[in-house]
Amino acid sequence: MKRTTMRQKKIFVIIPVLNESEVIQSVIDELCSAGQYSIIVVDDGSSDNTYQLVDSNIGITALRHKINRGKGATLKTGIVAANLLGADIVVTMDGDGQHDPMDISALVEPIIKGECDVVLGSRCSDTGEMPGIKIIANKIGNFVTWLFYGTLVSDSQSGFRAYSHFAAHIIDTKADKYEYDSKVIREINNNRLKFKEVPVKVRYTEYSMGKIQKQGFVNGIKTLIRMIWGALL
Amino acid sequence: MKFHFYQIVIVGISSIMLFQGIKEFVKREAGQTFVKLMVRLIVWGGMVLVAIYPDFTRLMANIIGIEDNINAIIMTGFLFVFVLIFKLLSAIEKIEQNVSELTRKEAMSELYDKIKSKAEEIGDKE
């Protein structure tokens, strides 16, 4: 039987960015050295020169939201673009350098083997990498996601994920902000998609922890309200 | 029948609001739905009714089953406010989604242009 390898599959990596001019170039360089991936960077209305920096890279698809629409809307734009460009597998990762591109091969492997449609990168809370407050917030997020969407996962808020061609086409959520990550879990459940969780490394730097638009306490509460509101509608 | 000043004010304001609502609906102005007209009629019509016939609140209290007429009015008011807030938030949500969709289409049009120019480039080379 013919074995399908990573080289035979068109793997698209989508990076949503917002004011990441400080680190985006190093993220792209690291990703390029990690493997042969098609890269789509979607700028969500940055006020700095993030888009110009990304667009100056040859071979990288740079897209831009003229106005800020949120992480979910940005990821959706990236997935729509990847589908249009004929992606076999779509990987999403953060643009602040938190995720290690070397983990992509582990993320896409179960999809290549045909074991599942979606692979969720799970940030290990027991390795000491994750700050205490994030562990608590993550546990609350997991509980609420299970409560509203019926699927219990170990990291419902992780943005490091891989989708098969089928999953990338079928998953459709209207969530624009951070609740997108949880809504994807709902879509997995509603569409009866097979999923797998794979442990991924996470690098909490001073830069990534200091970003105001990250999922902090206030944003976490807003996400929770939007999830409750979404369940009522 | 003796009218108090507050009753005249309430009837005046409510009449203007009712007139505007009916006029907009009849003229079929944008966003004027039957539901919206009904909400206007119930809210402002109810105000006129209560202002002219204060005893109407007792009838309302009896119908709802709450003994005190003022409590019945407040309860009904709260219910209306909640329904209105729900409708408003739903409308905002819908607008937000439309804005995102427009933004996405705009971003994608740049990609279409890039693909088109690339295809033309390849065509020229061939």
Image: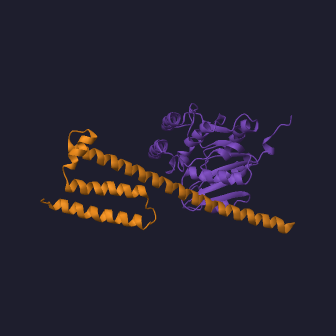
Residue located at (36% from left, 47% from top): B82
Provide residue A232's location: percent of width, then percent of height: 46, 42
Chain letter, colour purple in render: A
Q: Quadrant of residue A195?
A: top right
Residue located at (35% from left, 57% from top): B40
Residue located at (46% from left, 55% from top): B92
Determine whether A216 is above or below B103 in the image.
above
Q: Nearer the viewer, residue A114 or A138?
A: A114
> Which quadrant, please, contains the N terminus of chain A?
top right
Chain letter, colour orange in render: B
Q: Quadrant of residue A164?
A: top right
Q: Nearer the viewer, residue A201 or A77?
A: A77
Determine whether B76 is above or below B37 in the image.
above
Whether residue A11 is visible to the viewer of this picture, yes or no, is yes
Q: Is residue A114 left or right of residue B104?
A: right
Q: Quadrant of residue B43?
A: bottom left
Provide residue A91's location: percent of width, then percent of height: 67, 45
Determine whether B120 is above or below A113 in the image.
below
Provide residue A147's location: percent of width, then percent of height: 50, 34
Q: Is residue B72 left or right of residue A228?
A: left
Provide residue B68's location: percent of width, then percent of height: 20, 41
